[in-house]
Amino acid sequence: MNNSADRSIFCLLLILAVGTLYRALALHWSGLNLYVDEAQYWTWAQALDWGYYSKPPVIAALIAATTALFGDSELAIKCGAMVVYPLTTLVLYALARRLFDARVAFWTALSFFTLPGVAFSSLIISTDVPLFLCWSCALYALHRAVAEDGWRWWLLLGVACGVGLLTKYTMGIFAVSTLLWFAITPGLRKQFARPGPYLTALVAAVVFAPNLWWNHTHGWPTFQHTADISNLESGPGLHWDELQEFLSGQAAIMGPVLFVALLVLIARARQWWQSPHGRFLACFTLPFLLLISVQALLGRANANWAAMTYAAGTLWVVAWLLQANRRGVLVAGLVVNLVAMVAAYHYHAIAHATGRALTAKTDYYKRVQGWDVLGAKVAGLLAQNPGTRLLSNERDTISELSYYARPQSAGAVWWNPQGIINSHYALVTTMQGQGNHNFLFVSRETALPTGMADSFLSALRLPDINVPVVPGWSLDYRVWRLDGFIGYATASP
């Protein structure tokens, strides 16, 4: 490795260390609570399994690892993102160094680490965090496997793809991209007749098999949930509004300057088609973006569902801009993304410093505030009513309170008279055998669900709980003490 490469990797490691420390401090200073999905993932981590209602198991395993080391604070739960993203950045650096040179590698790593999607996602723990690492490792292993035809790289590729599938099922699009790359590259079509790709597929299948078995024994809930949230049965016609919203979200994830540059690069198909590296990177950028765009058009798609586009996509754009002597565009994109990162991290502080009064319409973090206060109040009620368990029929309520009302919230139960499996808690909790317990039913609703009062020997309304967050937004909850469960009286929503 030459002096230039030595300097670039040293500078990168320093930037990653300082950036990670800054993100940890920004999260600590923010005082924000867990988002509902994060709180739910934490509950998963308390009972590790090969699958869960809405996701495969890696996210729970990651949280279990970080909380085992650092405790159950919000920072400990989220810190997996702060560790994994720098690792992903280094893998992309290695890939870019292999395809191009140290300069492209450094700017690729810096660009990826500061993408708005990555910057924001570094303060939350989500399935995209480990998926980025699996996808990037798979990219690196694939390129080396094809170049060297070494068994270890095909094996590593299989492990990366298998763990990726245990993280999020959209890892399957990697196979689509690989097949496309082989098919459109004359020198690579011979791979279809070689054992390496089939070894990879076998290893990936073996790694992924436990989740398939878990789904089989639980009625395929994760696959059903994945189909439900895609909203492909939302009605005939094309949903252009959903596609527009989705594409706007892509600009927010990559940053407007770099995303426009990506669109310009895509439009110059003749240019990148003739470049082996350009064709490789295009095959691992375009299919993901196009497939999720089609899903948005046919039903709906959240912006982050296409996040893996920006592993290869960032490298692709950076290499093109540098080779075309457009470093000014790249620097502009970085500056815009850094400004967006600082604004997002210090949104409340900036609003306070500028005298701007935040409301329900302007406080974009309102959904991750107040849960700690609500949890303390509910924990107090549970302690004042010994022998009671938390009961709810709202996913966000039971997820947040399972964390913020602990340990009193242990053993929380989902109210499910119809027996519909529509949440993790409906899958793993039951009212059967609960006759010896009394309950505190906590809900946003102003009245008990139909038939609930008749399902218990007594039902007593307790004082409401109100937690103001910002003007126009508060956590307003009703609480009932329910004693003596005698069985579901009637089916109710």
Image (cartoon, rainbow, N blue to C red):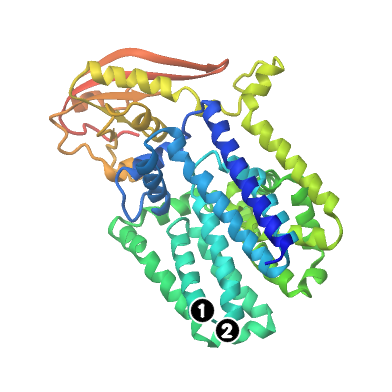
- Give above or below for 442 relative to 83: above
Contact (Cβ within 8 Å) of mark 2 with mark 1: yes
**Residue 383 image position (x, y, % from top left):** 24, 19
For this view, does 134 lie left or right of residue 119? left
For this view, does 481 lie left or right of residue 323? left
**Residue 117 image position (x, y, % from top left):** 63, 45
Q: Secondary structure at mark 2?
A: helix
**Residue 141 image position (x, y, % from top left):** 55, 70
For this view, does 76 lie left or right of residue 432? right
Rendered residue at 54%/66% (across/down):
138
For this view, does 440 lie left or right of residue 436? right
In the picture of the structure, the residue carrying the numbered disc 1 is: 197
Q: Amino acid at mark 1?
A: Pro
Q: Secondary structure at mark 1?
A: helix
Residue 449 in sight: yes
- Can you name the residue that lies furthest to the top here? 463
Rendered residue at 59%/21% (across/down):
360
In the picture of the structure, the residue carrying the numbered disc 2 is: 191
Rendered residue at 35%/44% (across/down):
45
